[in-house]
Image (cartoon, grey):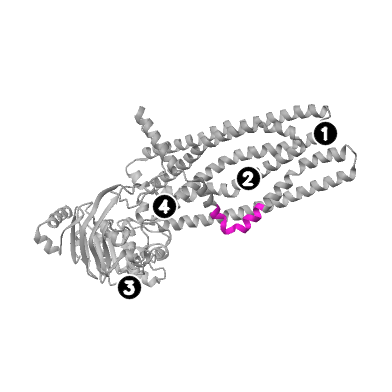
Amino acid sequence: MTPHAHGGGSTDDRPPIAPEHVRGRERVRLLLADSRRRMKGTGDRGRKVRGLAGLLRPYRSRTILMFVALVLGVAASLAPAPLAAAAIDKAIIPGDIAKLNLIVGLYVLSVLIVWGTSFAQTFLTGWVGQRALQDLRVRIFRHLQAMPVGFYERRPAGVLISRMTNDVEALNSLVTDTIVTLFQATLTLLGSIVILLVLDWQLALIVFLVFPVMALGSFIFRLVSADAYRRTRETIGAITADLQETLSGIRVVRSFAREPFHRERFAGLNERNRHANMATVNLNAAYFPAVEFVSSLATVMVIVFGGVQAINGNVEIGVLVGFIAALNGFFDPIGQLSQVYTTYQSGMAALDKIFELLDTESDLVDAPDAQPLPPIRGEIRFDNVAFRYRKAGDPSGETRLALHDVSLTIPPGQTVALVGATGAGKSTMAKLVARFYDPTAGCVLVDGHDLRTVTMASLRSQMGIVPQEAFLFGGTVAENLAFGRPGAHHDELEEAARAVGAWEFIEALPEGLDTQIGERGAQLSAGQRQLLAFARALVADPRILILDEATSNVDLHTEGRIEEGLRRLLAGRTAIVIAHRLSTIRQAGRIVVLADGGIAEEGTHDELLALDGRYASLYRDWAQQAAA
């Protein structure tokens, strides 16, 4: 059973899918529940805008310069239409060369201003946007680093990766392009309205007749597209999560010949992603041509009405020409605002997902008055400890009681083996010692210090953990061995590797300690990775050591070779050993038998055999399996 720790938050970005056999009222109920979930998940837009402004705040001086350049550029880009009207009516028709030269000079000046401000605006936008997104990536990464282990046990890694990649990339378009276009188009639209009214207010009123139609169309488009764009972020997150999971478990997939199942599942997720994106495509295909049609219709009305007015002498030719030229400055921004809204929706949906992640508070943090744990002797004490695992995504949904009324004292330097059936609470006790979780009741103490009163970094810096599946990082053997003590010399690494029986295979590698072992140590066998994990723990020289089924991936021959190394690794350290191997259990100073979340028996190997209770029964089963 995968544990789920305290705390809420969504467990997955995969949208709930009603099974095909669900019909009628049940399907309606599921759809309504899904709709409520989506409405609840939509963040307050004002909060998101404030959060976006917060990303830009450290670079406000350059942001202000960018907007100054934008305003100057928009003003200069609006100049050609009134200049054209003035050139025709005030210079060309009267034959005034001097005035024509002046107008041409002003036109050239406006072009130069547009060029200069466009350069400044593009550079500053890119500079500020990239810095802000760099800060955001760092912020997300630090937030993920600060989250407890339980957070990752209830969230697919692919979804978190999608936040950092797909959603930040969508936000990149929002920050570096969409926001600038939004302000630029808005200012251009407002400036064009003023110019149209100044040139001829009657013609302007004709143009403004299309406003209600466009406003209604824009309102419907925004209402329908908001949910569609959020679904695209969810489906791409689900695809990333499935891809990451499948690639991580490719050996298992191949072993069970489950490729067809995973291909079918990925195809289904891909199909849902296509449907989500096609919804946005259909909306765009219906909306944008309609905007173009209404714009063209308004232009025709201006030409017809203005042409008649010009023929009758009620409107000057230059005014009509300038007015038609200014129409581009009126309708183009409307089209830009409509188009940019799609990117805006996608970016805001991504921002909503990112802030949802950043707003997830860790339920396991250092107390405000937490003190560094001084160098420890290694005494561990469980004082009436109880712990409940909670249902993923539901902080109020308590499920099973993992531990209850556990009281146990482990003296400094003693090795204690925890045994019991699956689900008895062995790994839970180890996680409480490492403070991956806090107990629901009671307390866990090290050298008399309640772990909730000391900093987690100071605790874990004096602790070593060798898990069942050794995780190695991409890099060299030496870098992995020195992970817990980066300054360790090669001689120390070699000594630790020899102590646990790993040096023989390390020496046979092409470059010895400097051999690249690939992602997750893929170039090594499972047993070799486990040996490196033992050596890594020995290099770190922890006062408390936790071995969680650490010899399960090591064959009996290899285990026999590292028994002496294990004795050296455990010597002088307080150790909690979770194991099913008889050799590992027998050398423990004390054995604690867990059952149903409590301590059933404890004592030495011989004492528990003489008791002829749970341990004796387990031991006989293990002995029979070993003999077979």
Q: Is residue 57 magenta?
A: yes
Q: Residue at image x 72%, y 47%?
A: 75
Q: Position of residue 258 (x, y in %)?
A: 35, 40
- Is 148 left or right of 220, judged from the image as shown? left
Q: Are marks 2 and 4 in contact (CB under 8 Å)?
A: no
**Front one among 153 and 225:** 225
Amino acid type assigned to the residue bearing label 4 in the image: Thr
- Is 560 left or right of 310, judged from the image as shown? left
Question: Alpha-carbon neighbours of circle 1 within 10 Å: few (<14), some, or many (≥20)?
Answer: many
Between the residue at mark 1 and the residue at mark 2, the CA separation in whole angstroms equals 34 Å
Q: Which mark is residue 316?
A: 1
Question: Alpha-carbon neighbours of circle 2 within 10 Å: few (<14), some, or many (≥20)?
Answer: some
Q: Nearer the viewer, mark 4 or mark 1?
A: 1
Between the residue at mark 2 and the residue at mark 4, the CA separation in whole angstroms equals 32 Å
Q: Nearer the viewer, mark 2 or mark 3?
A: 2
Sequence-wise, which precedes: disc 1 or disc 2?
Answer: 2
Question: Alpha-carbon neighbours of circle 3 within 10 Å: few (<14), some, or many (≥20)?
Answer: few
Q: Nearer the viewer, mark 3 or mark 4?
A: 4
Amino acid type assigned to the residue bearing label 3 in the image: Pro
Q: Which mark is residue 375?
A: 3
Residue that numbered label 4 is attached to: 360
- Residue 196, picture quadrant: top right
Residue that numbered label 2 is attached to: 181
